[in-house]
Amino acid sequence: MKIRTAFVSNSSSTSFCIYGMEIEDPKDSYRWPEKWTDTLKQLNLYHQCGNPNYSDNSFIGEEAIGCPDDMVFGDWKKDIQQRCAEFVEITGAKIINDCGWHEDSWYDG
């Protein structure tokens, strides 16, 4: 019997854990505005949609694995806070939950 131990690409479950903030998605928009996407790239921020079953919000920040080896964890968190604040200032996004650890998971099956 073969047991799969690597990533399964057809899995219907999703989970994430990031340090950052929860923001409200733009109204009447299936896709994020180009300005928001461009700003994420410019600020080197990660974007994750929330659970589609009960939330219209998204999360921006960095995954826990994103902390550079040569950076103190507290400095890394401050850097993310500054970049998230700059994202909100540039885009006008509405903050739902301020910077902190955010995690979610769901199964679509």
Image (cartoon, rainbow, N blue to C red):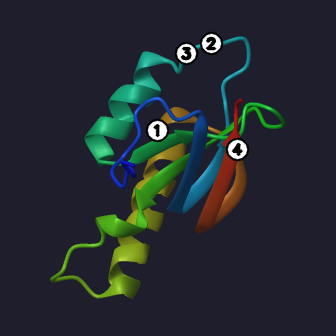
- Residue at 41 percent of width and 60 percent of height: 63
Q: Which residue is mark 3?
A: 31
Q: Which residue is mark 2?
A: 30
The image quadrant of residue 109 is top right
How far across and how far down the image is residue 42, in percent?
27, 39
How far across and how far down the image is residue 77, in percent?
42, 75
Q: Nearer the viewer, mark 4 or mark 2?
A: 4
Which sits in the foreground, 68 or 15? 15
Q: Nearer the viewer, mark 3 or mark 1?
A: 3
Dot 3: element: loop
Of the numbered discs 1 and 2, the one sitting upstream in the chain is 2
Mark on residue 106? 4
Q: Check disc 2: other Cα within 10 Å, few if <14, some if 14-19, many if 20+.
A: few
In space, the residues marked 3 and 1 are separated at their CA atoms by 18 Å
- Residue at 84 percent of width and 37 percent of height: 54
| Residues at discs 4 and 3 in contact (Cβ within 8 Å) | no
Is 45 above or below relative to 91?
below
